[in-house]
Amino acid sequence: MAQMNMLHAINEALSIAMKADERMVIFGEDVGHFGGVFRATSGLQEQYGRERCFNTPLTEQGIAGFANGLASYGMTAVAEIQFADYIFPAFDQIVNESAKFRYRSGNQFDVGGLTFRTPYGGGIAGGHYHSQSPEAYFTQTPGLKVVVPRNPEQAKGLLLAAIRDPNPVIFFEPKRLYRASVGEVPAGDYQIELGKAQVVKQGRDITVLAWGAQMEIVEKACERAEKEGISCEIIDLRTLAPWDVDTVAKSVTKTGRLLINHEAPLTGGFAGEIAATIQQECFLSLESPISRVCGLDTPYPLIHEKEYMPDELKTFEAIKASVSF
């Protein structure tokens, strides 16, 4: 298997999908000759032509509406929103059109060939307009799938699955890992099933759940906990909508404890939905209250980014508090 970073893995997935599907087009701000602001689409226009990989005007609502139109005519549309923070002008098109297209037509029409790619999250000193984690806004919208990879192998396999899924998918890419996350990636074409969490590490005392860039954080926190005799089971959720209730519930039934970590603010974050569901599913197995380690309920700060982040130490302290409850 080749060693590559997450950007390379995403680029390779896009190229594989374009080669296999002549109906697939990629578009967004600066994705053409420039290759995107992070270079995720580098070389694709040269390889597949300007008709299949091209720039759009700076209008996220227009990008999403155009994507809906292409997908409704049977095209495979992969639209890039340059930063997840910019997805809000497109919100109406995504939640009222993309998500509901199949339902309102009585399954006569759909936009299942639609994928939105967008880099999310902090850790790059981007300030409040280039650091947000808006995944929870979309998880309560029936008709959308929401996917977040944690490393290059996952990024390639999940993106190929997202592009080929018969439903519209929002694919959030942790941008602070674009070049920082390097690992072995299988050659060729492969897919990782959407809607399935992965148990990254077995444990017996507490289940620690995260996704995307926060997986690295919780793994480091769990290493600290292991040194103090706390055995942590680590789960990467991977798909937030639909999320894998069974895998998480099975783990929590075994460990009796659950800690959820995400970068988005605490209030209204997806951790709340997970906590409510697992409390219902595993109430008689719980040994302590479900814990959430999340971002702060403030705009994402530039100067105080480190204080905002749900980091390794905050997670470690919460693990200890949960086990000693």
Image (cartoon, rainbow, N blue to C red):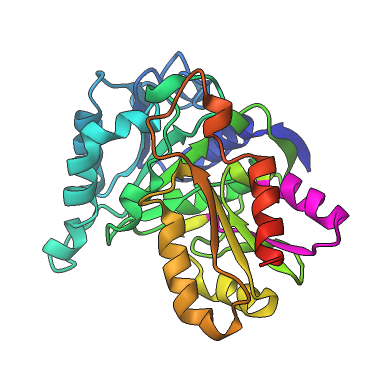
* Point 53% across, 80% down: residue: 282
Image: magenta residue range = 218-238
Residue 262: x, y in percent?
52, 47
Counting from the top left corner in percent of width and height, residue 289 is at: 55, 68
Residue furthest to the bottom in view is 284
Residue at position x 32%, y 28% in the image: 86
Report if residue 175 lies within the magenta region: no
Q: Is residue 79 above or below residue 109?
A: above
Give the residue drawn at x 24%, y 54%: 99
Query: Which quadrant would the N terminus be assigned to in this image?
Result: top right
Closest to the observer, 228 or 243: 228
- Quarter of the image where the C terminus is located: bottom right
Q: Is residue 111 visible?
A: yes
| 98 with respect to 297 (left or right) | left
Asked if 90 appears above or below 211 in the picture, the reply is: above
Judged left or right of residue 163, residue 314 is: right
Is residue 235 a member of the stretch shown in magenta? yes
Q: Of all residues shown, which one is farthest toward the top?
A: 34
Residue 244: give x, y in percent of width and height. 51, 68
| Residue 219 versus residue 133 in the image, above or below | below
Q: Residue 121: horizontal and vertical position, in percent?
A: 49, 34
Q: Which residue is depicted at the point 22% across and 32% down? A: 89
Q: Residue furthest left?
A: 105
Tell me if residue 113 can be seen. no
